[in-house]
Image (cartoon, rainbow, N blue to C red):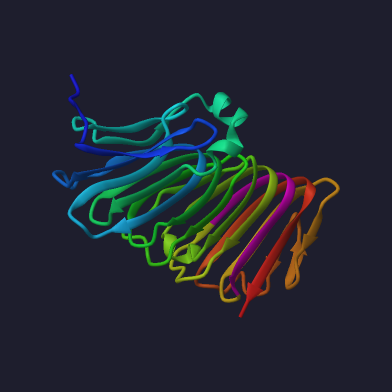
Amino acid sequence: MAVLARSVVLIAVTGASAAAQSWRTMDVSRQVRDSSEHSVRVHFPVGRFSLRATSDPVLYSMQLRYDEDYMRPWHEYDAESRRVTLGVDADDVRLRKHRRALDEAELEVSLSDAVPMDLALELGATEARLDVGGLALSRLRVETGAADARLDFSSPNKTKMRRLDIRLGAATFVIRNLGNANVSSIRVEGGVGKVDLDFGGAIHDDVSVDANVALGKLALRLPAAVGVRVELQRLLATFDHAGLHKRGDAYFSDNWDTAKVRMRVRAETVFGSIEIDRTP
C-alpha cells in the first residue's frame, strides 16, 4: 500500500476582510530524498500563480494565501509512486461564482532543479507567471481556463521533453524561449484567445507543432535558419505566411531541404488567424 506523507505546515491567520472572508497563509516544503523522476500536479482555480526552479535541497516548496471559507490547501506526497499534488482542493464551480472576491488568492511554487519531473498544471481564472527554466522536465501539461498566462523557458531544460501539451479556454497564453525546452512534440488546443509561441533560445532537434485554435490568433516566432513546413486547415481564417511558398498541400520555407533543424506545423482554425514570423 502506498504511504501518503504530508509535510510540516506553518499556518498564519492574516485577518478577515469586510466581506467576512477568512484569509490565511501557509508555507510548506519537503526535502529531496529520492532523485528519481516524480509526477507533480498543481491545481489552482483562481488567483495569482507563480512557479520557478530552485537549487535549494527541497523537492518542492509552496506558499499559499487562501480564503478558508472556499479553499482547502492541498499538499500530498506519495513516496511509493513518487507523486506530488500541490495547490487548492475546492469546488471550482462555487469558486467561479465568487471569483472577484477570491482574485487575491496567491500561490507560489518552487520545484527542485535536480529531480526529473512530469509536470501537470491545472489552472482556472488565474494570472500565471511560470518560469520553468533550469528544471528537468520530461513532460509538461498546462490546462487553463480564463487565464492570462506567461510561460518562459529562461534557461535550457535539463532533460529531453517528450511532449508539451497546452489546453486553453478563453485565454491569452504566451510562451517564450521555446528553443530551450528541448522538446520534440508540441500540441496546442484552444477555444477562444491568443497563443504566442516564441522559439527563442537554441533549437537543436526537429520539432512538430500541432495546433487547433477555434477562435483567436496563433502566432509562431522562430529563427529564419529553421526550415518550416506548414499544413493548414482553415475556415474563414487568415494566414500570414510571408517567406513560405505552397508546394502541393503544404507551405514550405525556402531552406526546408537544406536546414539542419526543421519544424513541421499542422494548424487548424475556424474564425481566427495564423501567423508565422521567421526572424533572422
Region rendered in magenta: 208-223
Name which quarter of the figure residue 89 lies in.
top left
Q: Residue at x 62, y 59 (%)?
A: 196
Image x and y of residue 230, in percent: 68, 58
Query: Quadrant of residue 262 in the image?
Result: bottom right
Residue beneath the point at 60% across and 38% down: 100
The secondary structure that dominates the magenta segment is: strand
Task: Compare residues 157 and 93 and report the one nearer the observer.
Answer: 93
Of all residues, the one furthest to the top in this rendering is 1
Q: From what the image shows, is residue 260 above or below residue 237?
A: below
Which residue appears at 51% of the width and 43% of the height? 47
Image x and y of residue 226, in percent: 56, 71
Give 242 or 173, whichever is nearer the viewer: 173
Q: Nearer the viewer, residue 42 or 280?
A: 42
Q: Residue at x 69, y 48 (%)?
A: 193
Does residue 115 appear left or right of residue 210 in this picture? Answer: left
Residue 210 among those drawn in magenta: yes
Q: Quadrant of the C terminus?
A: bottom right
Q: In the image, residue 215 lies at what x, y percent?
A: 75, 45
